[in-house]
């Protein structure tokens, strides 16, 4: 008896299977992934990649990687390289089949000429607004432009003049002559070519005209003999023109078919390259690969693996109706994957000192601790040192424990993971602040390994690190980038950014087995989450760990989900049912702090005092975001107030304080920094009066955060002043313009984009010291003449 093959997983595979069974295209399956190189790939693209490459593999077919690069204004080779890297990283290989729509410009042009010769396309001199107006509405048919009945000869002549570059941008367009009465607006003589005197990153200045998506895409598919052209639902109405073109131009056998599926939308995330670019350009994140970004490079840096992403894509499936997928589903795939990949180790991120009074000073004990819990079924362990002074998590101790708190408090006993029972004998407080600075404890030597011979029980188990052996770590705790479930739907989506999407804990300690861990290595820090070693470890002087994902879904409560399965995760579930139950109970008693709802009021949740301060800062011209962040914390507000009194540019000071300083402060409170508000004010003043560049100021800020000092003195000492002397800068400008006469000509011919290029050259020639404002002025001046 032969087993029936499994049913296709989705409607697209069902269609492909049916086509193959019917012998369509000779049984051949050819798909393509067609990104436009105008940004980095995101997790939505992963859905498309997994689908296209997956189907090709399942049906013995091929999948092309095609750069859909027909818009010269937004595309860039940097993006091409990044896209290639990401597709490869995700686990797919296009072999020799890498194509560029720009390589087809010649063939596409031929196709357009053919349409013109056959009376199926015409040159229209109407303005964009006129074309729009004449197109009609859903209830009214379109009307013919007065140029619609031009003869084929006249159209050919005009189209050739467009191609020859004789006509300026916007003078006319080439339109397909289809059907002005069509119900589908896309069929009402769509524009297929427009004039753009623009430099293309691959074809250079060869083409003054560029094809539109609706023309280039179907024909590129046809040239590559694609059989199944998969795209997202927004293109449903484009299918008719797709078919019209492919048929009109005789690509009938075999011919590609467009099939639409629902794009991936993810909650608490924006998935559009335009928006992601805005996040990068507006410095709301540190770059395309910021670990909070939904880009593949961001996810990779955050420690998410290709396997987890592919698993996620498999779970969400492919459907024909748009929906919003819960980001918790992605996190679930990530946890499942890391559970079998990340060895368990211990680190303390917010350390409180414990001295064990009955453990001799200078002695140490090495405990063999397993890397894996039982249910993972993997072998392996490492030695963990135990000594008289330990670090534990500050949060694991309460002077006055609330009901149900099973961790450490005066007189209480807990289990130290893999070691002993520990009793707190005394909490030492700083008399000045009342803050607990140290715990004096004792261990019960008979409990080594975690249980007491007398059957006595403890309910809590905490992690720890031996202070003498610990390696310093900086932990970067990431959370969702947005507070709202569907930020993309809001007009003012940037105001929905989560101000706590990154919290840096700069003063942590890890067990010594982590020393020298390579970037990309992943761990589960027990009870804290899954982490990955960041590449910044190389330059940071200590191990930098990015939190990939928490151990359980801390957002479930807000969303109304509250299943026990996720809640008990990560609480030493491998210690057996008892401990797991304790963990679950504890978790239930100490729910994560509520997240603010969508903040319509930007200062919602602030205390009355803080709100008053925030409102005052708004008056000074600060953005609502900056005002809130600064006002919310009295120490930050004090620092800000100090600085703005020294130098009257509150907006700039706020920007430096909110955006630039935190990475250097690395979790230290402002009061502990080796410099104060006056120095920050001085730094900003130096930038404002043009003495130093923003870039130099950033370097100085890093130095201030490390060692303190006076910005003005440092600038003088090192000769960091910008070249603001107009004569010196003018010489550099002349030299650059002299060396690049081609670019000068192009600029003067209208390619004003090149200004950036010239600025860059002058900056380079002056070792980065020229005042960019002055450079800009001088360049504009000289280039205009
Ligand atoms: P964005 O909307 O993010 O700018 P795009 O569609 O402009 O994306 P392209 O580079 O044109 O980006 O996309 C390449 C392929 O990836 C297309 O086939 C597109 O349909 C697909 N794709 C883009 N975003 C998603 C998504 N969110 N879910 C599924 N597929 C997507
Ligand atoms: Mg697109």
Image (tube, rainbow, N blue to C red):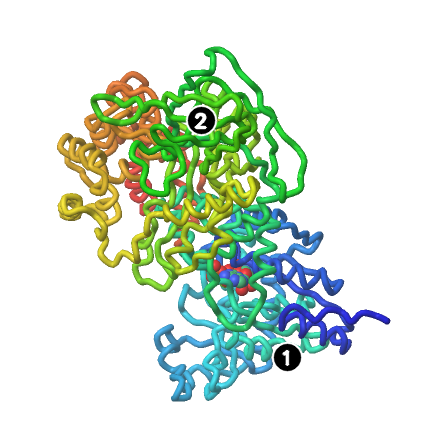
Q: Quadrant of residue 242?
A: bottom right
* Image mark for residue 247: 1
Q: Quadrant of residue 442?
A: top left
In this figure, which residue is indicated by the disc labeled 2?
422
Q: Quadrant of residue 508?
A: top left
Q: So how many labels did they put on this image?
A: 2
Give the residue displayed 35% in from the left and 58% down from the top: 484
Q: Residues within 10 Å of mark 1 (few under 14, many from 20)?
A: few
The image shows residue 746 at horizontal and vertical percentages of 43, 50
The image shows residue 249 at horizontal and vertical percentages of 64, 77
Query: Seen in the image, is 26 located left or right of residue 131?
Result: right
Query: Seen in the image, is 292 located left or right of residue 577?
Result: left
Name, please, the residue furthest toward the front: 454
Q: Residues within 10 Å of mark 2 (few under 14, many from 20)?
A: many
The image shows residue 733 at horizontal and vertical percentages of 36, 35
Check the image and report above or below for 348 versus 120.
Answer: above
Looking at the image, do the residues carrying marks 2 and 1 touch, with CB atoms under 8 Å apart?
no
**Residue 271 in view (yes/no):** yes
**Residue 198 in view (yes/no):** no
Give the residue displayed 44% in from the left and 16% down from the top: 358
Give the residue displayed 56% in from the left and 54% down from the top: 203
Work out which quarter of the rendered image holds the N terminus and state it. bottom right
The image shows residue 751 at horizontal and vertical percentages of 41, 52
Q: Nearer the viewer, residue 498 or 423?
A: 423
Judge: label 1 CB < 8 Å from ligand 1.
Answer: no
């Amino acid at each position: 008896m032969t087993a029936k093959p499994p049913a296709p997983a989705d409607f697209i595979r069902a269609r492909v299977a049916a086509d193959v069974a019917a012998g369509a295209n000779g049984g051949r399956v050819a798909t393509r992934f067609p990104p436009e190189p105008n940004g980095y790939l995101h997790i939505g693209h992963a859905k498309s990649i997994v689908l296209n490459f997956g189907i090709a593999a399942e049906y013995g077919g091929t999948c092309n990687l095609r750069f859909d690069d027909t818009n010269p204004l937004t595309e860039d080779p940097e993006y091409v390289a990044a896209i290639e890297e990401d597709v490869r990283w995700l686990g797919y290989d296009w072999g020799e089949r890498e194509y560029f729509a720009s390589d087809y410009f010649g063939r596409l042009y031929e196709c357009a000429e053919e349409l013109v010769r056959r009376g199926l396309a015409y040159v229209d001199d109407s303005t964009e607004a006129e074309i729009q107006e004449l197109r009609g509405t859903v209830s009214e048919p379109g009307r013919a432009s007065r140029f619609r009945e031009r003869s084929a000869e006249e159209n050919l002549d005009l189209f050739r003049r467009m191609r020859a570059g004789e006509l300026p941008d916007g003078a006319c367009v080439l339109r397909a002559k289809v059907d002005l009465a069509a119900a589908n607006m896309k069929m009402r003589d769509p524009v297929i070519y427009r004039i753009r005197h623009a430099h293309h990153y691959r074809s250079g200045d060869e083409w003054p005209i560029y094809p539109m998506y609706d023309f280039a895409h179907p024909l590129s598919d046809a040239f590559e003999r694609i059989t199944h052209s998969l795209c997202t639902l927004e293109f449903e109405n484009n299918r008719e023109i797709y078919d019209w073109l492919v048929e009109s131009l005789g690509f009938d056998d075999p011919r590609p078919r467009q099939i639409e599926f629902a794009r991936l939308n993810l909650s608490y995330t924006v998935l559009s390259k335009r928006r992601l670019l805005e996040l990068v350009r507006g410095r709301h994140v540190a770059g395309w690969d910021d670990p909070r970004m939904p880009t593949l490079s961001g996810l990779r840096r955050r420690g998410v693996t290709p396997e987890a992403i592919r698993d996620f894509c498999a779970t969400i499936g492919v459907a024909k109706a748009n929906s919003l997928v819960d980001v918790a589903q992605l996190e679930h795939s990530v946890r499942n994957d890391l559970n079998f990949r990340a060895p368990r180790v211990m680190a303390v991120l917010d350390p409180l000192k414990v001295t064990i009074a009955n453990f001799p000073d200078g002695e140490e004990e090495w405990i063999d601790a397993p890397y894996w819990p039982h249910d993972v079924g993997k072998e392996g362990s490492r030695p963990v040192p135990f000594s008289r002074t330990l670090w534990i998590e500050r949060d694991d101790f309460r002077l006055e424990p609330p009901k149900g708190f099973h961790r450490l408090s005066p007189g209480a006993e807990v289990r130290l993971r893999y070691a002993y029972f520990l009793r707190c004998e005394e909490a030492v407080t700083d008399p000045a602040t009342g803050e607990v600075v140290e715990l004096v404890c004792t261990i019960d030597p008979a409990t080594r390994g975690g249980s007491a011979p007398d059957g006595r029980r403890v309910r809590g188990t905490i992690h720890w690190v031996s202070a003498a052996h610990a390696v310093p770590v900086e932990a970067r705790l990431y959370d969702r980038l947005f507070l709202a479930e569907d930020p993309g739907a809001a007009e003012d989506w940037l105001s929905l950014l989560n101000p706590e999407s990154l919290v840096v804990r700069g003063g942590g300690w890890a067990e010594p087995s982590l020393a020298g861990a390579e970037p990309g290595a992943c761990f589960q820090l027990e009870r804290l989450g899954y982490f990955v070693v960041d590449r910044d470890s190389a330059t940071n002087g200590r191990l930098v760990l990015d939190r990939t994902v928490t151990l359980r879904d801390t957002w479930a409560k807000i969303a109304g989900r509250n299943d026990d399965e996720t809640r008990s995760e990560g609480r030493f579930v491998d210690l057996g049912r008892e401990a797991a139950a304790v963990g679950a109970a504890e978790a239930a008693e100490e729910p994560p702090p509520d997240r603010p709802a969508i903040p319509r009021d930007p200062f919602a949740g602030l205390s009355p005092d803080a709100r008053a301060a925030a409102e005052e800062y708004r008056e000074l011209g600060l953005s609502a975001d900056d005002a809130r962040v600064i006002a919310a914390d009295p120490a930050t507000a004090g620092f800000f107030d100090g600085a703005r009194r020294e130098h009257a540019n509150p907006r700039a000071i706020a920007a430096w304080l909110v955006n630039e300083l935190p990475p250097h402060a690395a979790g230290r409170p402002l009061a502990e920094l080796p410099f104060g508000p006056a120095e920050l004010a001085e730094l900003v003043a130096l930038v404002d009066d043009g003495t130093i560049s923003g870039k130099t100021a950033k370097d100085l800020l890093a130095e201030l955060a490390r060692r303190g000092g006076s910005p003005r003195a440092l600038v003088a000492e090192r000769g960091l002043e910008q070249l603001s002397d107009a004569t010196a800068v003018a010489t550099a400008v002349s030299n650059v313009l002299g060396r690049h006469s081609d670019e000068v000509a192009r600029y003067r011919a209208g390619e004003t984009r090149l200004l950036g290029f010239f600025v860059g050259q002058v900056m380079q020639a002056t070792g980065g010291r020229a005042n960019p404002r002055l450079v800009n002025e001088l360049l504009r001046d000289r280039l205009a003449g």
